[in-house]
Image: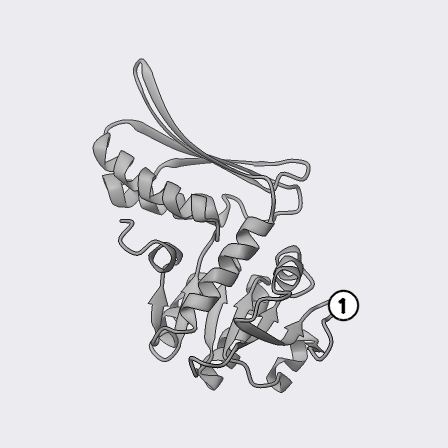
Amino acid sequence: MRDDSPIRLLIHGASGRMGQSIVRLLHGDGRFALVALVARSPVQAPDGVEVLAPDRLDAAPEFDLAIDFSLPEAFDAILHVCHERRSALVSGTTGLAPAQCAALDAAALDIPALWAANFSLGVAVMAALARRAAAAVPGWDCDIVEAHHVHKKDAPSGTALALGAAVEQGRGREPAYASLRAGDIVGEHTVQFATAGERIELVHRATNRDIFARGAIEAAARLAQQPPGQYRFADLMFPGLD
């Protein structure tokens, strides 16, 4: 895309919590020109922004980048359209099947693509710390405990699995997981290392969903300027963190 023009943005999954937060936070952000919302249920769109049902995604206006927070069954369609139009994709849709992850890898040969289980800056730092701690105490027990609201379907959460992958990179084996679904918890994750007589805990608590929406917006702004490839959220936001 041209560096002197706003990023033409499509939001896929605009009727969900994350989609609504992103639309609200984009107000007044001159880096973006919101062109379309794709939603399963009615949403209020800013003036001049087209609203499409998921089955009309092919009719979307031209866009430079899509932000996707939808469901696994809707992911294939947005990936296909982005790949076909050579538009960048930022996705936070969790619960993807291995075949969908492979399709994303293939698409990233032609488009800039970023998938992350969590768009919190704090969680990105936590993953790097967990990797280092796991390497430092490889013989200790490691457990990841996560808690979310009652409506979250996948368990363990995508964030817990991402933290677990960081632990596995550090010590060569995966941790144990425990999940809790209760009330309206936005998201809490604990990575615990324990041995006889002592324990280390890394804890991240999200109290406001806007932290994830802000992270996705910032990642989108940076990804739009990148060449084709598969990018990590932490690498875009904190180059050299690892």
Please give left or right for residue 104 compared with residue 80 in the image: left
Q: Is residue 95 visible?
A: no
For residue 195, what is the image quadrant?
top left
Q: Position of residue 68 (x, y in %)?
A: 55, 66
For residue 48, what is the image quadrant?
bottom right
Q: Secondary structure at mark 1?
A: loop
- Give the total of numbered labels: 1
Q: How is the image coloured?
A: one colour
Q: Position of residue 89 (x, y in %)?
A: 47, 71
Q: Position of residue 118 (x, y in %)?
A: 48, 51
- Name the one closer to the observer, 195 or 127: 127
Quarter of the figure that contains the N terminus: bottom left
For residue 72, what is the image quadrant?
bottom right
Q: Position of residue 225 (x, y in %)?
A: 39, 74
Label 1 is placed on what type of residue? Answer: Gln
Residue located farthest toward the top when viewing the structure as drawn: 197
- The residue at the point 59 percent across, 68 percent down is 74
Tell me: residue 236, above or below residue 173.
Answer: below
- The residue at the point 51 percent across, 59 percent down is 216
> Tag 1: Cα neighbours inside 10 Å, few (<14), some, or many (≥20)?
few
Tell me: residue 19, above or below residue 144.
Answer: below
Please give left or right for residue 130 compared with residue 150 in the image: left
Please give left or right for residue 41 compared with residue 144 in the image: right
- Name the one closer to the observer, 94 or 18: 18
- The residue at the point 61 percent across, 44 percent down is 208
Q: Circle 1 is placed at which residue position?
A: 44
